[in-house]
Amino acid sequence: MRIAFVSGNREKLPDAVVPLGLLYVMAATPARHERILVDLCFERDPQAALGERIAAFAPDLVAIGMRNIQSNDYSGTADHVESYRRIIEVARAASPAPIVVGGSGFSVMPGELMERLHPDFGIAGEAELAFPQLVEAIEARTRAFAAVGNLHWFEGEQLRSSDPAPAFLDMNTLPVPDRSLADPRYYERHAIESIQTKRGCPLRCDYCTYPLIEGRVGRARQPASVVDEMFQALELHPATKHFFIVDSVFNLPKSHAKAVCRELIARGWTTPWTCYANPLGFDREFAELARAAGCAGMEIGSDSGCDEVLARLRKGFTTVQIRALHELCKESGIPDCHTFILGTRGETLDDVRRTLAFAEDLAPWSAIFMMWVDDREAVDPLLRAQHESQRARIAEILLRYQEGHPNWSIPPLRVNFDEKLFRRLRRRGMHGPLWQHMLPPLAAPTRETVAR
């Protein structure tokens, strides 16, 4: 079969991101199938480019990766869903091939998006096993779709769904993504590469969609395999200046995170990297190992400065633990960026003010403030209208804080979060997550100070 893989993500703020998930699925597709990657991220006219590539390739199947429903700045969802509707429309006009949609965004609400976008098929969750099974069923003309785990499809106008896959995949059995397929502009313009050390998150945060996508059971890769892939990626794209570890939480379990850090140290890794971290499972040994292994910063989903809100969100930690993490980062020389989500379910405007006061007192290297957007607003205009009035009130409060906090970013208000600012920082040779460059660099400890 001839299969066109389409990456529909076009977000470039704060950085354009290599479509790692789609590359994983491409790598898992048997080599006997002819494959192309159609990446729309940098296209000036994405619809025209898509139509031309699809028509020229004449695929037997079009596979579309949907990374996000909502934008990275939590400013809205509707345009993203509409853009994927247009992608499907253009693909259908250019080819009679069936269309399958998957990816993290699709996995959040597969039923609703099947009804809204109306592709032929949709795969929720991991697709490295399910997609080849779907290809085989289409190729054999058996219509044995019910045997493909987590598959959604239409029979006439009726939406059908198969049973969930029996188990999540072992990360150590998956083929390494072929990064040579990635558009060179990811590296020339943004110089960031991504790496995944595990899938699955054991936490139960109220709003989080990671368990829907990856499950709750952590499935870690062998540390040597992770570092092998990092060196291979760097050799393939030497313009890379920074790595981002895309695990939902890198330091859980902390034993695995420490093992990866020790492997990086033992092999003399020097390229800076950043990760998501959590106050749970965060200790001094991990912080010092991470810094010695090249960690240039950690992004922490602190979410709120109110213990009552943290409990309602089922975060599993308190403001005391957030402060403890900050102090360990400071002592170890690791810049810390805390993300706060304002206006979550049940949160009052007084809670919002308390969170802002907490952030001022915490004084981390950087802080990012989002306003809550429910994923279901993408398919429910009434819900969206209800939440917009709350976001407008929160925006009024945030406007009073934009002065005097040069290391704060408020993406919904474009405070320290806009394309011109990021382009200017990159022209000055600054790479990686750009919040790291809001303040002068911390002094880095020597490797001799690190407990091995």
Image: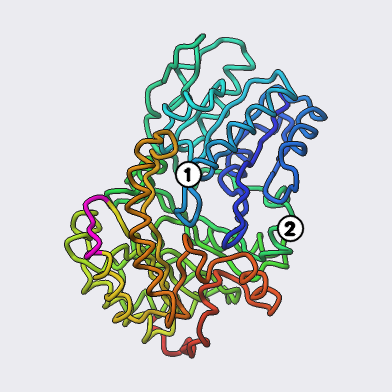
Which residue is under mark 1? Answer: 77
Of the numbered discs 1 and 2, the one sitting upstream in the chain is 1
Mark 2 lies on residue:
185
* Helix, strand or loop for disc 2: helix
- 131 up-or-down from 335: above or below: above
Q: Position of residue 168 (x, y in %)?
A: 40, 38
> Of 156 and 329, which appears nearest the observer?
156
150 vs 321, left or right, is: right
- For the point 18% across and 65% down, the residue is 307
Question: Which residue is pictured at 67% across the width and 49% down the height?
Answer: 41
Check disc 2 and give the amino acid type. Arg
**Tag nearer the camera, 1 or 2:** 1
Assess whether residue 92 is covered by the magenta stretch.
no
Which picture quadrant has residue 400?
bottom left
Q: Which residues are magenta?
A: 345-351
In the picture, the quarter occupied by the C terminus is bottom left
Front-lying residue, 87 or 314: 87
Disc 1: CA contacts within 10 A as few (<14), some (14-19) or many (>=20): many
Residue 240 x %, y %: 67, 67
Relative vertical location of residue 102 with respect to residue 195 in this rendering, above or below: above
The correct choice, above or below, for 378 with respect to 208 in the image is above
Of 427 and 224, nearer the camera is 427
